[in-house]
Image: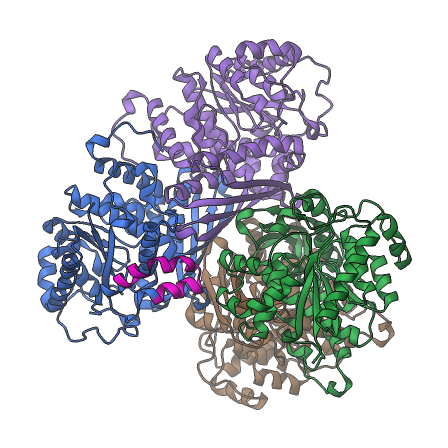
Chain colours: A blue, B purple, C green, D brown
Amino acid sequence: MARIGIWIIGARGGLATTLIAGTHLMAAGRATRTGLVTDLPAFAGLPLFEPGDVVFGGHDIREGDVHLSALEIARANGSIPAEGLRAIDEQLAAAEAHIRPGTAFQGGPAIRAFVGRSVKSRETPKSAVARLRRDIAEFKTSERLDRVVVVNLASTEPPPDAEPPRDAAGLVKALSTGRGLRAGSLYAAAAIAEGCPWVNFTPSVSAMNDAVVDYARREGVPTAGSDGKTGETLVKSALAPMFAHRALRVLSWQGYNILGDRDGLVLSDPAHKASKVKSKDAVLRSVLGYAPHTHVGIDYVPSLGDNKTAWDFIHFEGFLGHRMSMQFTWQGCDAVLAAPLVLDLCRLVDAAAVSGLSGALPDLGFFFKSPIGSEEHDLHVQWERLTAFAGRLRPASKRVARRRR
Amino acid sequence: MARIGIWIIGARGGLATTLIAGTHLMAAGRATRTGLVTDLPAFAGLPLFEPGDVVFGGHDIREGDVHLSALEIARANGSIPAEGLRAIDEQLAAAEAHIRPGTAFQGGPAIRAFVGRSVKSRETPKSAVARLRRDIAEFKTSERLDRVVVVNLASTEPPPDAEPPRDAAGLVKALSTGRGLRAGSLYAAAAIAEGCPWVNFTPSVSAMNDAVVDYARREGVPTAGSDGKTGETLVKSALAPMFAHRALRVLSWQGYNILGDRDGLVLSDPAHKASKVKSKDAVLRSVLGYAPHTHVGIDYVPSLGDNKTAWDFIHFEGFLGHRMSMQFTWQGCDAVLAAPLVLDLCRLVDAAAVSGLSGALPDLGFFFKSPIGSEEHDLHVQWERLTAFAGRLRPASKRVARRRR
Amino acid sequence: MARIGIWIIGARGGLATTLIAGTHLMAAGRATRTGLVTDLPAFAGLPLFEPGDVVFGGHDIREGDVHLSALEIARANGSIPAEGLRAIDEQLAAAEAHIRPGTAFQGGPAIRAFVGRSVKSRETPKSAVARLRRDIAEFKTSERLDRVVVVNLASTEPPPDAEPPRDAAGLVKALSTGRGLRAGSLYAAAAIAEGCPWVNFTPSVSAMNDAVVDYARREGVPTAGSDGKTGETLVKSALAPMFAHRALRVLSWQGYNILGDRDGLVLSDPAHKASKVKSKDAVLRSVLGYAPHTHVGIDYVPSLGDNKTAWDFIHFEGFLGHRMSMQFTWQGCDAVLAAPLVLDLCRLVDAAAVSGLSGALPDLGFFFKSPIGSEEHDLHVQWERLTAFAGRLRPASKRVARRRR
Amino acid sequence: MARIGIWIIGARGGLATTLIAGTHLMAAGRATRTGLVTDLPAFAGLPLFEPGDVVFGGHDIREGDVHLSALEIARANGSIPAEGLRAIDEQLAAAEAHIRPGTAFQGGPAIRAFVGRSVKSRETPKSAVARLRRDIAEFKTSERLDRVVVVNLASTEPPPDAEPPRDAAGLVKALSTGRGLRAGSLYAAAAIAEGCPWVNFTPSVSAMNDAVVDYARREGVPTAGSDGKTGETLVKSALAPMFAHRALRVLSWQGYNILGDRDGLVLSDPAHKASKVKSKDAVLRSVLGYAPHTHVGIDYVPSLGDNKTAWDFIHFEGFLGHRMSMQFTWQGCDAVLAAPLVLDLCRLVDAAAVSGLSGALPDLGFFFKSPIGSEEHDLHVQWERLTAFAGRLRPASKRVARRRR
């Protein structure tokens, strides 16, 4: 049985905590596997690691403690079951012991408030990358891991101030000056340089762009991103095709998201929000084939915590120009929706790495708001592509005729 | 240019009126073609008739007048544009002139109140079918039509009191006794016997069952049904796959429909409602692969008229057993949503008939709540099948490589 | 400091458990007093008992244990804080020790399933009342209580099968035969005969009617009811006056309630639901002064537990006959909303008893869906009456000029 | 029978058109009086003018035509009944004939685009006021009117750039320099100087402030404002008291308004929006007695036209700190909701003027988001004050004992 490391950027955040606790709870048989896409029949027979194979570590710029964070989530939100936490005390402590100071390089205004004392403030991008690499390498060695996947769960960064590098060479060169880079670029570079698959679950464009993809391709590691599709945009990508295929003309699609966790606080800063809104707004134009009036609002409502609520209003025109409407309210816990997808992605990029794939994996677009290497946003087409991709990862011995669903 | 007849069962109802007026308004260039699925690029190059090719006629058990009905809809709901009606005076009068008394045979309790004086109350099923056939034949001759499609838009009938016939022979035999039949069966038999494709846009099971399909196959005409998917169920079939593919477990899906038109009044009778609720409730089990707690309510709210409103509440479980919810409100005008689909279906069954197909057309499941010959309810899979079917109808000369969407 | 007993009918139910745990948590300083109406400034200076003065006991027909019930609610719903429960172990055990078997006399079909073994099945109404009285009397003596208030929190009973008694004499007489009575009548009779104020927080009409009120008046104890107004009806009674005072004509008001606790299960039986729907539907006619089209649905959705969700759709007409709509979704935890109101009512009827009031207290209509002795359903007028009533309970010494709010 | 003039600032807008057409339709017996608050029993016996007594005129900075505007509204929205318009051809033409060019003095950025050619761009504030007064005076003379009420229905202005005048003397003085003034101040000054009651139905603070009120008091005319309460804020002021009186703690109240008419376009400019949001946000703090987290969004969605849609999400805390939520969607036509209120206000200020009242009328707060002279925002307290005010306007001869509602 292979031992797999999952190295998390933002390892003390709510999503990371939910992922770490949830994975260990599943391994201990104390939580159902609901929400794990890669557990569906369409993925049977794939060489995917199991929750019990995983060791966690990561970087964070904040001080904190994963165990305390898990207790706090259990108490405040109930989304991690309090009674189960005792059974995984040891694993949470182990994860915490593997967390190293991250880098806040050009992290953006809303990030500065969180930066802990152990984060070096006067480090060049190049030396930061060297340090980050050492942390990952030590993790792998000390835990005798067969493979490590690196996944970015940090807060959304603002778009870069300057033009980002265009290719691998440009990225390597930019590390000397820092021009066009932010912390996300450094994490990506470190992961890829260490030969680890890189998953960007955030909308931060510094962490996933042409240069990052090119670097991954050149270094022979697969990469996937960006921006996990967990709530309002997920629903959009499931519903918009209905309007398209029924020839109902969408006149306006207004979306209002309210949330209260650290993610919401960071996004309440306009510089950071810009990355997110752009990521959320691409779906409709792509699926509908024209650009209706749209708006995506994100507002910080502290009392909601991680229980994101979104209201979407869709105004559309049908036969004879008659106008009608649909509205929906989505009430979901972001970390709970995202955590299993992160695990799905780690399983899939790991299997992809083992099977020799490298560079962008556009067939994982199902998981993302801004899928790299793909313009497809129709959730159902994305599902077809994902399952076809899974079929190709399946060992020949298991590629027996499989019934659809 | 072929001349096509569309013979409507329930020709004076709100949906029929919207269809007749809308088709003629489009032909006159006074209405957009929004809502016509068969106008989408996926259907380009198919041999489909045009709105200007169509002549309408039909059966109805109610007295009335299509023109007055159109004016009333324009005034009360605005869903037919009042200003355009003058331009199609003549066509509305022509349609009205082609409407003949229908049959109310075993139509159900809520229907009786509507039955007009000209409807024969003491007619055997067999002589009724003969009379209905004569009406269709005369329509075809008098208007020198190349082909006629018959479509059922009448009010929902209760399920049959006795076991319905199993095959064509049984259906023909049952016409002598009426056992297991209702009005819908007679209309279907008459249409098929006249060599006309038969579309059952209602949930009435007497109008579409194994015997009807077998009869159509034997007589060499294509048939499609049942129960047009226009509102809440449409959204269900677009959204439920999202929950399935994201491995989110649906715990409960409650749906409440309120509407105020004649359809709503008929459905407020429990006998009639039974057919409808059954048709609406099949989607979830099929798409999800398990049976969550569900409820489908239909209540009559006179003030809403044809502006159906539906509220659905979806309670679901995600990672670590955490419970979340989604709710949507759909506010649509039923006739406006249904009318273009009826035209789409007439175009497609006509093209299917021309290309020699007969019996059930399961690939038209995209349009129906209870697709005959198919267990597939995932809207997106249905869309793939529909467009593949369209590809097969396309003349070889036009089957050039076509870009996806 | 007076010692006050609160004797609960249905003492092991979710609402009773929340009330008992919550009162003791407040007394221990481990819970805020949010939701206690009688803590608002309008009630300052009234002679109201404090949470720390209260001892709980009661009747129940189910087996169970208040402490386990509290733990279960804490675990499943989080509405009772798990961490606080240890601090009130002793009080929960004391409450449990004071719970006696109730009576299931004519309790209705949905109740039978719950009845525990200790409940006597062959007891005459008269001997049941005598037994219930003894239980209350022993509670008072053993705990050396100054006063006891009895409150009915049991499941909703069906309407009585026969005409209920009209006055006190009729009630006393009916106890011999049981004719027109149900369990609720026996509890009411026992409480009143023991000189305890009687609060009917349920819609059960057997527990509050002309005979019960007359009996209370004759015995010199105050009584209040019926059917606590906690959710959808509360909102209705706050919103309907807006439509009335703005001269907007309500055409239809549809209300759909879904819930999953024992209350919901009992109400899913049509016999039991009848009492509830009637109670919920009176508001609109009273406030609007005319009867719009209305519907009140209650459906059992197990996954929701006590988290009741209600969707109301209001269709209304404004200037020039133009039609508009409003809809709301209420998502509240029934026990959490009801428990503080029960405590408010106990405080107020106790103060009323001390000040010598007896019979119906119509000024407490603010708390009820079916206020006895009052036709007023406008929440705001009810609020004015409640605060005026409070003013009259205030000792002369404290009746200084008080600023409005 | 007195002849009454209603002089409208913004006389060619959608609200003015709906008011003018609606009043004449009511006078002609072709429209119901739904929505007229002053038609409720509480106002019986008051000396109020009737729709048939009214002649309309006004100022506007846009070119246009009331009749065409009415036809356009009838066609696009159906909120003015098309069939009735022919019957009031003459009255619409008469109103149009009485419309004079307004002033765009400091009207704000979003206004400039609308200003027609006939509006003088180089006029001092003083000469503008003189011209506006002449227009009103001529209207009164030419139509032999007994009294004229002036009501501001123009688009929302930005807050003034400089400190506005504090009192009547300051206002008169400021007319020489224009300092601290905008167009709204000039209209107010002209109306009051002409002895006409002044109603500010907009949130524009230049049109209603201490100086305006003082001027009205000094000149002996009554005045009322500001910002008609028609939709989301109306609901807020009806619902917030429910939370306050039930001791439920509001944590967050998010409100999102989307609309597409000219009002929405003007408000999409941040300078103009500032006035509106401030006006909408005062309710909660006042009614609740504390300041929860709030947000009021207004977004321009062209396809909606005048059919404003608002979604409000209310997060609140109850017993034991448990969190719950309520959400509502309001779908109303702004002009339809506002027009009867404007007529109500004209009737009431006219009756107030006749009975000798002058200066601010705080008891009309029921109609406004920012009631002058009152801090009360509880809709129900406002209703009590309004009906008490009506009682005082009632002639002694009619002050017989009146039943509540």
Q: Is residue A93 located in the magenta-colored stretch of the structure?
A: yes
Residue in the image at 85% along x and 52% along y: C175
Residue in the image at 52% along x and 81% along y: D127
Q: Quadrant of the N terminus of chain C?
A: bottom right
Location of residue C253 in the rendering, given as x and y in whole percent from the top left corner: 66, 51
Q: Quadrant of the C terminus of chain C?
A: bottom right
Location of residue C166 in the rendering, given as x and y in whole percent from the top left corner: 88, 55
| Relative to D170, residue C392 above or below | above
Residue in the image at 38% along x and 29% along y: B386
Q: Is residue B139 located in the magenta-colored stretch of the structure?
A: no
* Res. D382 image quadrant: bottom right
Q: Is residue C321 left or right of residue A75?
A: right
Q: Is residue A65 visible?
A: yes
Residue placed most toward the observer, C82 or B395 = C82
| Relative to D148, residue A405 above or below | above
Location of residue A77 in the rendering, given as x and y in whole percent from the top left corner: 44, 62
Location of residue B136 in the rendering, given as x and y in whole percent from the top left corner: 57, 16
- Which segment is the magenta one? A68-94
Residue placed most toward the observer, B321 or A369 = B321
Residue placed most toward the observer, D235 or B146 = D235
Q: Is residue A93 left or right of residue C41?
A: left
Residue in the image at 73% along x and 77% along y: D352
SS majority, magenta: helix
| Relative to C176, residue B46 above or below | above
Instruction: Count the labels in the image.
Output: 0
Q: Is residue B28 visible?
A: no
